[in-house]
Amino acid sequence: MAKSYEIVIINGKDYPCRFGMAALMEFTKHTDIKINDLGNLGNDMTMEEAITLCWCGLKDGARKAKKPFNLDPYDVADLIDEDQQAIEKMMEVFANQFNTEMDDEGNAKADKKVRKK
């Protein structure tokens, strides 16, 4: 079974990153973005939304990797200040995981469950 998170290297340190349902739930809880609008993430995002999304991905990644997580969104903003490519790396993970897991894997699992019944 494949890892359910990816490692993002920020300032030479490894951070597990995952944008599963828990991350998306956390993100919608902290922003005004609704579930129907998740497919449009990345279009006209505010800086606060982008940093919050990255924070949610790191938080969910740490949870899945069973590692402690004690960063807040401001800490994530500081990480991004120190490594200008960090936000791009995390957004790439988001794009890969959101598109792949939500479209292909999610539908394949749903199809298998339907067929079993």
Image (spheres, grey):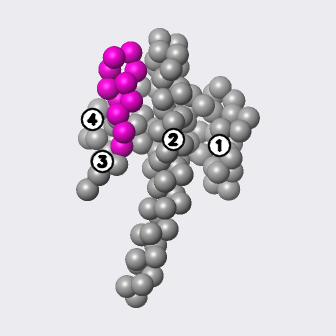
* Magenta residues, start to end: 5-15
Residues under labels 1 and 3: Cα distance? 24 Å
| Residue 96 rendering spot, x and y as whole percentages | 49, 45
User: Contact, CB < 8 Å: mark 2 with mark 1?
Assistant: yes
Location of mark 4 (residue): 67
Magenta-span inclusion, residue 72? no
Q: Which of marks 4 and 1 is nearer the N terminus?
A: 1
Q: Is residue 7 left or right of residue 88?
A: left
> Hey, what amino acid is under mark 2?
Phe
Q: Earlier in the sequence, mark 1 or mark 3?
A: 3
| Residue 73 rendering spot, x and y as whole percentages | 51, 26
Q: Earlier in the sequence, mark 2 or mark 3?
A: 3
Residues under labels 2 and 3: Cα distance? 15 Å
Q: Earlier in the sequence, mark 2 or mark 1?
A: 1
Location of mark 2 (residue): 94
Magenta-span inclusion, residue 7? yes
Residues under labels 3 and 4: Cα distance? 14 Å
